[in-house]
Amino acid sequence: MEKFDLTPAQRNIDDMQHFYSGTAISVLCGAVIFEEKLEPKLLFRATRLVIRRQEALRLRFCVENGKTVQYVSSEGG
């Protein structure tokens, strides 16, 4: 698995997370409200398909030798 350095913007976020560790500084959340009833299994399959096709949604981060690096997971959700 090939690993990559963080971009400058990602490094800034990583630095901020370390500086404000133990807080919710970088927690993102959201909600989607649907007007109509949906089929849960179909929605789940569609979500997995989008994740499988979009590398940015499969980015994973790990620390190696004290440095945060990133890689693209092969798992699709």
Image (cartoon, rainbow, N blue to C red):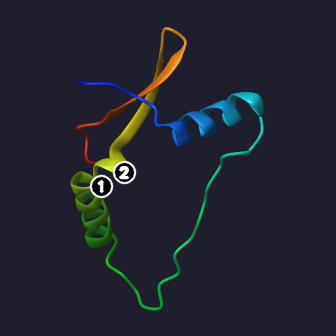
Q: Work out how far the residue at label 1 is from the one at label 2, CA to CA, in angstroms.
A: 6 Å
Mark 1 burial class by Cα count in 10 Å: few <14, some 14-19, many 20+: some
Circle 1/circle 2 CB separation < 8 Å:
yes
Q: Nearer the viewer, residue 29 or 64?
A: 64
Which residue is pictured at 32% across the width and 25% down the height? Answer: 3
User: In what element is the residue under mark 1?
Assistant: helix
Q: For residue 51, which numbered disc appears in the image? A: 1
50 is higher (above) or lower (below) than 60: below
Q: Identify the residue at horizontal 26%, vertical 47% (top origin).
A: 76
* Direction from residue 69 to residue 50 in the image, left or right: left
Query: Total marks drawn?
Result: 2
Which amino acid, mark 1? Answer: Ile
The correct choice, above or below, for 64 with respect to 56 in the image is above
Q: Amino acid at mark 2?
A: Leu
Q: Decide: is 64 above or below 31.
A: above
Q: Which quarter of the figure is the N terminus placed in?
A: top left
Q: Residue furthest bottom?
A: 35
Residue 55 on image: x %, y %: 29, 48
The picture places residue 66, in percent across and down from the top left corner, at 55, 12
Which residue is rendered at x = 23% and y = 38% of the image?
Answer: 74
- Helix, strand, or loop for circle 2? helix
Q: Position of residue 64 (x, y in %)?
A: 46, 13
Sooner in the amino-acid sequence: mark 1 or mark 2: 1
- Mark 2, residue position: 57
Toward the top, the furthest residue is: 65
Few, some or many C-alpha atoms within 10 Å of disc 2 (few <14, some 14-19, many ≥20)?
some
**Relative vertical location of residue 19 with respect to residue 25 in this rendering, above or below:** above
Residue in view at x 61 percent, y 39 percent = 13
